[in-house]
Amino acid sequence: MMTRLLVLTGVLLFLDGYLFFGLRSVFSKSKFQPYLLISYAILAIISYIGLYIMIQYFQERTLNATLSRNLLIGVSFSFIIFKLLFFVFLVFDDVIRILNYGFQSFSKIMGYTPKVNFDERRKFIVKLGLGVASIPFATMLYGITKGKYNYKVKKLTLSFANLPKAFDGFKLVQISDIHSGSFDSVSDVQNGVNLINDQNADVVFFTGDLVNGNSREVIPYINTFKSIKSKVYSVLGNHDYSDYNKWDSKEAKKENAALMDVYHKEMEFHLLKNEHVKLEKNGEEIIVLGVENWGKGFKQKGDLDKALSGVDKNAFKILLSHDPTHWDLKTIPHKTNVDLTLAGHTHGMQFGIDIPGFKWSPAKFRYPRWSGLYKEAKQYLYVNRGFGFLGFPGRVGMWPEITVIELKKV
């Protein structure tokens, strides 16, 4: 751990030195040079403080975030991205400088006076790099201040031939990946819950990752989530099993796992662990299945057979399963004819682009089903991008999501 930390610090110090002196050289004749250098130095210092706080957090595993900690860590993340992008342009500038030196030397030997002004072109490249690197830096700063609580309601309608008539027009809300230990504002989270309530859903489904690793993280937000007006059904995500924290003993870890059930009850979330419940309306019913976490490369406690025990194969079924890889590797091959599966887990990588007609995120390189609606035969999967955030304390483009799905009979 210490060796990796020293290597990382060494790389960042090299980048800072290289970029600082690069800026000083290129803007040597500009009246803005002192301001650029002072601004860079201040941001560099802030980013090192944020890096130190992040390391301390992972070592001490403090329960809940604070606004100052999230801002410092967020600036550190953002400034590292800025440095890497700007570094590429400065390296390109140095390559041109070397080529220019060779060209000038060769021209003198040949008795030729070049007419090309390489210095002006170099300055343009560096200024372009400064502008390009500033764009993601500015958007990430927005992401750590406003974007992380910029809740978006995604609405869609799904039609099914086998949906009981009584459930025609049934409205459900899905939220996922709360990660309560990452929040730094009870009031902002309450605004998200108010938005959930505004949807007037018949039922709310939560598809896992209530905390980052310690069940006690949710304590400040119990009353907030308890204020959800609709009945809530939930499942566990990979972060809800106490596996990502260091515990003093097996008993302490076991106690923390037991608290997960306790806090679900206090929030009045009905937690499903490889089981099912029936939702009844006007003498008809649909089945809600809930499995424990099962994901490729993650904890695999989900037992679909157990959840389906006693369920009529022709019943209309909704499955809550945290990780979308479970749908491809278990649900579809199982031939269970689950009509709709709701998942989360990916967060849309908390970074990407989502505009009409185009959707992209680095998450696509890890998860084939990373956001939105997917269909195989007559079975649907919806992957929610998450209500909270983890790691990078913000969101850029992939805003926190509240999904509203209306069921229709055809």
Image: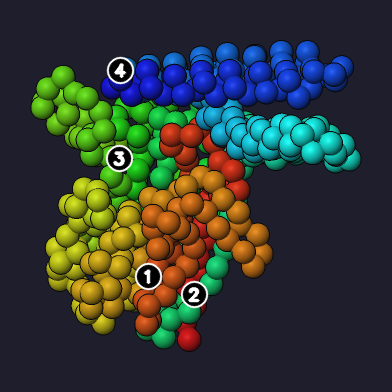
Front-most of 331 and 87? 87
Dot 2 alpha-carbon crowd within 10 angstroms: few under 14, some 14 to 19, many 20 or more: few
Q: Provide the secondary structure element on which disc 2 rests.
A: strand
Q: Position of residue 375 (x, y in %)?
A: 42, 75
Do residues under tags 2 and 1 come within 8 Å of each other at their CB atoms?
yes
Dot 1 alpha-carbon crowd within 10 angstroms: few under 14, some 14 to 19, many 20 or more: many
Q: Is residue 410 left or right of residue 30?
A: left
Q: Provide the secondary structure element on which disc 4 rests.
A: helix
**Which label is found at residue 239?**
3
Do residues under tags 3 and 1 come within 8 Å of each other at their CB atoms?
no
Q: Which residue is mark 4?
A: 2
Q: Which residue is mark 2?
A: 158
Sequence-wise first label, 2 or 1: 2
Q: CA distance from mark 3 to mark 2?
A: 30 Å
Q: Residue at x 20, y 56 (%)?
A: 302
Q: Amino acid at mark 2?
A: Leu
Looking at the image, residue 17 lies above or below residue 128: above
Sequence-wise first label, 3 or 2: 2
Q: CA distance from mark 2 to mark 1?
A: 9 Å
Q: Amino acid at mark 1?
A: Leu
Q: Disc count in the image?
A: 4
